[in-house]
Image (cartoon, rainbow, N blue to C red):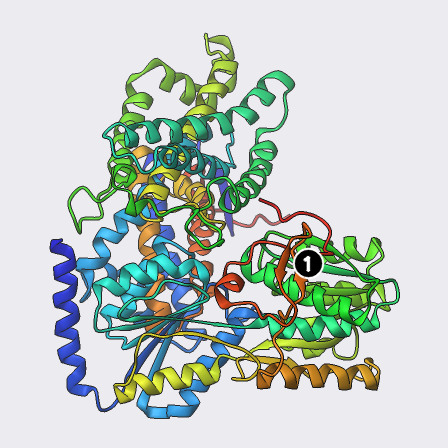
């Protein structure tokens, strides 16, 4: 316990030291799981960091460490940021959950924001985005546009986040086209261009003419472009460089409004523990421009769906929906609760194949 | 004109001096790199090498050096035995993963029982797991003369798939809301590899690494088996004529390095990392190869090399946060270290001689 005390004293001492200068700068640290140039997940978090700098100018100082492995290394990086006087630290990967909680215990005066987790504390908030709303729009476009009625889906890991996206896309693809089939490949990686390209090729060979991806690189789009006459979507980032080719739209993570709001809250002293799960309505999930390759009527339907999701008038999981085994999940008009969605570990009726265990 | 001339005997002096030369050249080249990136090179080098040891927050970083260096040293010691005998275990990363899975699996099987024997059993399971994974390339080499470099490396990818499967299936935390990853062993005191003195960074893995250094030193210098290892590496023909049994040597070297890598994995998963997760492995098994060579395959050398490598990691993180250096620049810097070591190594076996150009 001595060490904890030592750290706490150091933190207090620093707290005192920094509070003397508190008027000039709020220090904000960011811990990234990938390189800032990944073009997807980390790239968007870093864009939001730059937005914070642009918003507050001299009043804020941001630092970041990229490619931080989850576990002991993450704990050290966070401790280091806290020791050096950070007021607020964003930890932007699910695997940082326990390290964030551990470090937060040692630095009660520092605020922490953990992305995509579920453990909160006095000084730890969690935030995530309802990407499944974007998946619903993707599913609709995919269902309307497929000619082979086979839609390929590249999953990263069989975790609730990914399964939720698959279900949402499937439900809306089926609504648009009752003959649609999903073929799913698990890549077991978030970012590995070679593996992702292989997965896309396998799916195309199996007859898929639409490729949806829940991995972060542009490799599946490149593979789709090479195969010709295949469409796909940007993931996490707009991936607009493929807009002349296979990319017909995209799901964009936009963390900037949230980051700016939270930094502001720390500055004003109004920061409180919160669990945020925002979607299209709050602007955390963006839908990239739908290209002209999509017929005008489909585009209009997709945009109408987007508006309905944004206003809250329609929920992406609205009954009747059965689980894969045929048992009832949501009754007519019933809407899924957040708890079930957060831990979703089942496919809905119609998806073939099992979730790997 | 300069000419390289082979030394009749490898130079002892240079064998000791080259690592220091390599470090100095790396600092210079690294400094130039940092300068090109628009940073003050002196500040960058100071941040990487000085701040973690003597800076304002050294009280926190010094113990972290042990946490980071411990597994590197433990794995590198095992690897160095084989490397000396020309047996190339490149797959320590895989053995590290399997050791962690087996050790954590045993611990989690007892959850939530609290008993003194759980942690020792986990240690045994971790070592056995790593050993068994290394026995695959060993047996294949002995029976079918397969190449252990390829087999052990390929098994890393198999181990990674197994790790993902364990995090999502068998070892998944039943109270984890469906998210991947096992229970956190830090919350299970019988299985938690805690610091022995709080704040010192000393956990059982670090202690084991130190014991391994001593054990390897004695083995290589005082034991017949160590002599066989050295003889096979330095004079294979002589080894053939004396009573060295190559099969036994392959099984021992691969088995030992596997067991030590497995132990490193177990101590990491039960201590600093805390849980089995999809991204549990962070490359210790590969970095240990650099550590083994940087330490001249000598136990004491490896001890220092492991700590030096840990220093560049920790200092590198500080440099990223404080100076805004990209992570890739730090990795490049670490890579330079091995590159220059191998380059300067030339001087151990060769000397530079001036020769006059002769007119024809």
From where the camera sits, is residue B186 visible? yes
In which quadrant of the rendered image does the C terminus of chain A lie?
top right
Q: Is residue B137 above or below residue B354?
A: above
Residue A17 image point, x, y percent = 14, 79
Looking at the image, which residue sits at the far front? A332
Residue B24 image point, x, y percent = 34, 56
From where the camera sits, is residue B45 visible? no
Seen at 57% across and 29% down, the residue is B148
Q: Chain of mark 1?
A: A
- Splitting the image into 4 quarters, where does residue B130 fall? top left
Would residue A346 be found to the left or right of residue B86 on screen? right
Q: Is residue A357 above or below residue A191?
A: above
Would residue A319 be found to the left or right of residue A336 on screen? right
Q: In the depicted view, which residue is nearer to us: A234 or B237?
A: A234
Looking at the image, which residue sits at the far right? A147
Label 1 neighbour load within 10 Å: few <14, some 14-19, many 20+ = many
- Splitting the image into 4 quarters, where does residue B266 fall? top left
Q: In the depicted view, which residue is nearer to us: B17 or A45?
A: A45
Q: In the depicted view, which residue is nearer to us: B143 or A108?
A: A108
Q: Is residue A111 above or below residue A299?
A: above
- Splitting the image into 4 quarters, where does residue B106 fall? top left
Q: Which residue is under mark 1?
A: A154
Give the secondary structure at mark 1.
Answer: strand
Q: In the depicted view, which residue is nearer to us: A28 or B233?
A: A28
Count of number-bearing discs: 1
């Amino acid at each position: 316990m001595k060490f904890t005390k030592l750290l706490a004293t150091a933190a207090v001492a620093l707290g005192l030291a920094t509070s003397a200068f508190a008027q000039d700068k709020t220090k904000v640290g960011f811990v990234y799981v990938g390189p800032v140039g990944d073009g997807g997940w980390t790239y968007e978090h870093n864009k939001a960091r730059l937005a914070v700098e642009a918003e507050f100018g001299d009043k804020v100082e941001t630092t970041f460490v990229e490619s931080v492995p989850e576990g002991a290394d993450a704990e050290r990086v966070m401790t280091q940021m806290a020791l050096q006087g950070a007021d607020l630290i964003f930890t932007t990967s699910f695997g940082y959950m326990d390290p964030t909680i551990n470090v937060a215990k040692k630095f009660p005066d520092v605020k922490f924001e953990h992305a995509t987790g579920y453990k909160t504390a006095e000084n730890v908030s969690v935030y995530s985005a309802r990407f499944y709303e974007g998946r619903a729009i993707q599913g609709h476009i995919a269902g309307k546009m497929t000619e082979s009625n086979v839609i390929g889906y590249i999953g990263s890991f069989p975790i609730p986040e990914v399964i939720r996206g698959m279900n949402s896309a499937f439900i809306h693809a089926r609504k648009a086209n009752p003959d649609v089939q999903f073929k799913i490949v698990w890549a077991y990686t978030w970012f590995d261009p070679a593996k992702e390209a292989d997965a896309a090729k396998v799916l195309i060979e199996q007859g898929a003419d639409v490729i949806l991806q829940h991995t972060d690189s542009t490799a599946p789009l490149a593979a789709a472009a090479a195969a010709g006459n295949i469409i796909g979507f940007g993931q996490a980032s707009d991936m607009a460089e493929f807009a002349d080719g296979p990319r017909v739209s995209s799901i964009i993570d936009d963390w900037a409004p949230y980051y700016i709001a939270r930094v502001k809250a720390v500055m004003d002293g109004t920061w409180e523990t919160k669990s945020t799960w925002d979607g299209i309505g709050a602007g955390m999930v963006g839908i990239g421009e739908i290209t002209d390759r999509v017929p005008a009527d489909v585009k209009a339907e997709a945009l109408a769906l987007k508006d309905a999701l944004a206003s809250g008038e329609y929920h992406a999981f609205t009954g009747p929906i059965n689980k894969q085994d045929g048992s009832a999940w949501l009754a007519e008009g019933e809407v899924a609760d957040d708890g079930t969605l957060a831990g979703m570990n089942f496919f809905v009726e119609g998806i073939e194949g099992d979730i790997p265990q | 004109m300069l000419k390289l001339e082979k030394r009749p005997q490898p130079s002892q002096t240079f064998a000791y001096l080259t690592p220091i030369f390599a470090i100095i050249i790396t600092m210079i080249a690294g400094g130039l790199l940092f300068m090109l990136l628009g940073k003050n090179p002196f500040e960058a080098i100071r941040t990487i090498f000085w701040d973690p040891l003597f800076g304002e927050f050294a009280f926190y970083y010094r113990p972290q050096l042990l946490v980071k260096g411990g597994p590197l040293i433990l794995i590198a010691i095992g690897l160095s035995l084989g490397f000396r005998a020309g047996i190339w275990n490149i797959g320590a990363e895989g053995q590290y993963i399997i050791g962690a899975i087996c050790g954590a699996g045993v611990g989690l099987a007892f959850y939530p029982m609290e008993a003194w024997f759980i942690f020792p059993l986990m240690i045994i399971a971790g070592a056995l797991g790593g050993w068994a994974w290394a026995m695959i390339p060993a047996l294949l080499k002995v029976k079918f003369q397969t190449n252990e470099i390829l087999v052990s490396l390929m098994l890393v990818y198999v181990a990674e798939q197994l790790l993902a499967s364990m995090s999502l299936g068998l070892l998944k935390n039943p109270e984890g809301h469906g998210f991947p990853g096992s229970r956190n062993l830090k919350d299970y005191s019988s299985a938690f590899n805690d610091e022995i003195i709080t704040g010192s960074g000393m956990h059982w893995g670090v202690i084991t690494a130190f014991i391994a250094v001593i054990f390897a030193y004695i083995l290589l210098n005082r034991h017949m088996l160590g002599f066989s290892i050295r003889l096979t590496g330095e004079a294979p023909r002589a080894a053939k004529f004396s009573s060295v049994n190559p099969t036994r040597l392959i099984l021992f070297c691969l088995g030992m390095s596997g067991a030590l890598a497995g132990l490193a994995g177990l101590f990491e998963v039960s201590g600093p990392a805390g849980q089995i997760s999809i991204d549990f492995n962070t490359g210790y098994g590969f970095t240990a190869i650099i550590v083994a060579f940087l330490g001249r395959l000598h136990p004491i050398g490896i001890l220092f090399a492991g700590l030096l490598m840990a220093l560049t990691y920790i200092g590198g993180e500080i440099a990223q946060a404080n100076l805004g250096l990209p992570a890739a620049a730090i990795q490049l810097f670490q890579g330079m270290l091995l590159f220059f070591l191998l380059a300067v190594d030339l001087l151990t076996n060769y000397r530079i001689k001036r020769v006059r150009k002769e007119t024809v």
